[in-house]
Amino acid sequence: MKNINIKDYSKYVDEKIPKTNYFKNSFRAFIVGGLICTLGQGITNYFNSIGLNNEEVSTVTAIILVFLGAFFTGLGLYDKLGKFAGGGSIVPITGFANSIVSPAMEYKKEGYVLGVSAKMFSIAGPVLVYGYGSAVIYGLLYFLFTK
């Protein structure tokens, strides 16, 4: 076995590691995330203009953005957007829809019960459990201390 010098090994590793362009990646994430949020604001403005109240507008906007995220994931376009934009496509609500639909599509070959249903929430499941658990605890505290 060869005796490898630590400096030579470090130099070799540095040559093989792909270089990351943080500025370009941050810019792409900012632009794509901003465009998704601008789309959401446009949807919100439209439904406000036709007379829906704020609660209805918020609900409709969320439903449309989740649908679009799931739809474009199903077409295979959201994954391409994710590779291009990174966190800019993951952070908005459309990324949440992608995190549910992607595993479901991946495990479809295992069947609808053991594949799609079981794996659909593998990524988003912990977020949902935390959200539901927090809501229940908050609701109980609100109920107990507001009377």
Image: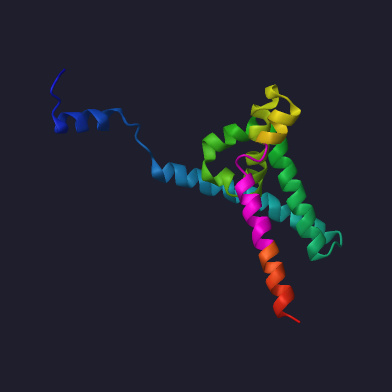
Is residue 99 positioned above or below 74 on the image? below
Residue 111 in which image quadrant: top right
Residue 80 in which image quadrant: top right
Foreground pick, 5 / 32:
5
Residue at 45%, 42% in the rendered image:
25
Is residue 129 positioned above or below 15 on the image? below
Foreground pick, 32 / 112:
112
x then y, percent, for residue 12? 23, 28
Viewer can see residue 75: no
x then y, percent, for residue 115? 69, 29
Residue at 26%, 33% in the rendered image:
14
Q: Main secondary structure of the magenta part?
A: helix
Viewer can see residue 27: yes
x then y, percent, for residue 38? 65, 52
User: Is the C terminus in the top left, top right, bottom left or bottom right quadrant?
Assistant: bottom right
Foreground pick, 38 / 77:
77
Side (left or right) of 59 relative to 128: right
Side (left or right) of 135 relative to 52: left
In magenta stretch: residue 125: yes
Residues drawn in magenta: 120-135
**As drawn, which residue projects farthest toward the bottom?**
147
**As drawn, which residue projects farthest toward the top?**
1
x then y, percent, for residue 79? 59, 33
Is residue 50 positioned above or below 78 on the image? below
